[in-house]
Image: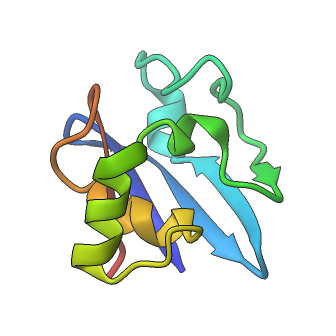
């Protein structure tokens, strides 16, 4: 599954989960722009960011505590499935300017 990562309304990259590996890669147009990286931990570069765990920057967009429990119950999401939680809860109202949109 692949999702698009937006900074305000500008596509800045994609995040994929393949075989339990998370891969973030910046969009080539975004890389050429004057825009800053979406995170200090994800500096602008052509190479992919590959991790066995969801990158901390994206985990930081997820709710915690009682709000996490409410979201998981209402949306019928496994509490340990961070990628699905990210897709279902970070489409509109997030801390900062980053939003996540599932590719159709």
Q: How many marks?
A: 0
The N terminus: image quadrant: bottom right
Give the vertical position of 19 relative to 2 (above or below).
below
Name which residue lies at 36% across and 61% down: 69
Q: Quadrant of residue 93?
A: top left
- The x and y percentages for residue 4 are 40, 59
**Residue 41: percent from left, percent from top:** 68, 24
Q: In the picture, residue 97 is in which quadrant?
A: top left
Task: State left or right for residue 70 relative to residue 20.
Answer: left
User: Taking 47 as reference, is 17 left or right?
Assistant: left
In the image, residue 45 sits, relative to residue 3, either above or below, namely above
Whether residue 53 sits left or right of residue 57 in the image: it is right
Q: Nearer the viewer, residue 85 or 73?
A: 73
Q: How is the image coloured?
A: rainbow
Would you say residue 62 is visible in this rendering?
no
Q: Residue at x 62, y 17 (%)?
A: 40
Q: Position of residue 18 (x, y in %)?
A: 72, 78
Which quadrant, please, contains the C terminus? bottom left
In the rendered image of this protein, does residue 69 appear above or below residue 8? below
Q: Is residue 5 left or right of residue 21?
A: left
Q: Is residue 36 above or below residue 7?
A: above
Q: Residue at x 29, y 50 (%)?
A: 67
x 52%, y 23%: residue? 37
Front in this rendered view, residue 69 or 96 = 69
Q: Position of residue 56 (x, y in %)?
A: 64, 37
Say if residue 40 shows up in the picture. Answer: yes
Question: Which residue is outermost to the front?
Answer: 66
């Amino acid at each position: 599954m692949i999702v698009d990562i937006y900074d305000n309304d500008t596509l800045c990259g994609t995040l994929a989960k393949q075989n339990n590996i998370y891969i973030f890669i910046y969009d080539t147009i975004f890389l050429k722009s004057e825009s800053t990286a979406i995170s200090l931990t994800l500096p602008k570069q052509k190479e992919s960011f590959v991790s066995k765990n969801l990158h901390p920057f994206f985990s930081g967009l997820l709710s915690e505590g009682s709000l996490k429990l409410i979201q998981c119950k209402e949306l019928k999401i496994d509490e340990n499935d961070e990628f699905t939680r990210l897709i279902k809860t970070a489409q509109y109202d997030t801390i900062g300017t980053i939003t996540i949109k599932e590719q159709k």
